[in-house]
Image: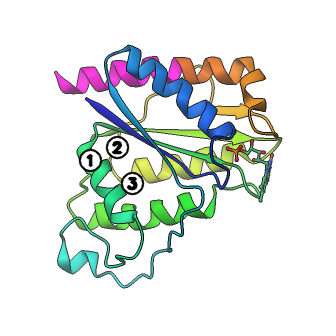
Amino acid sequence: MKVVAFNGSGRKDGNTAVLIRRVLSVLEAEGIETELIQLAGEQIRGCNACRTCFSTRNNRCVIEDDNVNAYIQKMVEADGVILGSPVYFSMMSPELKALIDRAGYVALANDYVFKRKVGAAVVAVRRAGAIPTFDAINHFFLISQMIIPASSYWNVGLGRKKGDVANDEEGMQTMETLGKNMAWLIKKLKT
Ligand SMILES: Cc1cc2nc3c(=O)[nH]c(=O)nc-3n(C[C@H](O)[C@H](O)[C@H](O)COP(=O)(O)O)c2cc1C
């Protein structure tokens, strides 16, 4: 059993990473292998809407000069996917959006290749815009026929400076509960 997590923040090891790592530590304690990929510093192109993925149908995007195809492959091989983002002007980061647009189109073109995998969104926010961001990431899971575990609150942590979010007790507890529910769900789906 494996979960791959993507941190869409432009800032490596910031608040989004702190939140994701809390979920991953619970998953690891439950015996689930994890991997965290941080997109900071990467150039990830947006979808060019060529629809080549609908004719090649090989689980790949036609754009080959960035890491998206490798990331799609990691999602294909995983049982669960975590997509984390800070809030930028009330939405997810452009890097995560580009990954979602391209991986999402490739998945749809390939008989919903992420179907029935478990998907969880994680959001870091200073003040406002967390819920639209959380919703937008969940829309990717929903249209991909993925299954979303719940937590005790929406999966949001509050903070501005790097590491601030660790002081958001309720946010960190939400990640802990998310990790437990995600592990429970993955194990149920495996039996
Ligand atoms: C370009 C940019 C836009 C931002 N827009 C918002 C916003 O709309 N609402 C908000 O509450 N915080 C906003 N923030 C603050 C970040 O969401 C917040 O600092 C978050 O904890 C950063 O997470 P990170 O450390 O993982 O990058 C913005 C930060 C940046 C760099």
Helix, strand or loop for disc 3: helix
- Amino acid type, label 1: Lys
x 55%, y 18%: residue = 176
Return the x and y of residue 164 as percentages of the image width and height: 78, 31
- Amino acid type, label 2: Met
Mark 2 and ligand 1: say if the CB distance to the nearest ligand atom is below 8 Å.
no
Could you tell me what secondary structure mostly forms the magenta stretch? helix
Q: Which of marks 1 and 3 is in front?
A: 1
Q: What stretch is highlighted in magenta?
A: 177-191
C-alpha distance separating marks 3 and 2: 8 Å
Return the x and y of residue 9 as percentages of the image width and height: 63, 51
Residue farthest toward the bottom in the current orientation of the protein: 50
Asked whether the residues under the numbered discs 1 and 3 touch, taking CB atoms below 8 Å apart as contact, a structural biologist would say: no
Return the x and y of residue 138 as percentages of the image width and height: 50, 46
Q: In this view, does 19 lie above or below 11?
A: above
> Callout 1 environment at 10 Å: few (<14), some (14 to 19), or many (20+)?
some
The picture quadrant where one finds residue 156 is top right
Residue farthest toward the top in the current orientation of the protein: 29
Q: What label sits on residue 146 in the rendered view? A: 2
> Callout 2 environment at 10 Å: few (<14), some (14 to 19), or many (20+)?
many
For residue 176, say whether it is visible. Answer: yes
The picture quadrant where one finds residue 172 is top right
The picture quadrant where one finds residue 167 is top right
x 76%, y 23%: residue = 168
Magenta stretch: includes residue 70: no
The residue that label 3 is drawn on is 143
The residue that label 1 is drawn on is 115
173 left or right of 72 in image = right
Q: Which image quadrant: the C terminus?
A: top left
Magenta stretch: includes residue 187: yes
Helix, strand or loop for disc 1: loop
Asked whether the residues under the numbered discs 2 and 1 touch, taking CB atoms below 8 Å apart as contact, a structural biologist would say: yes
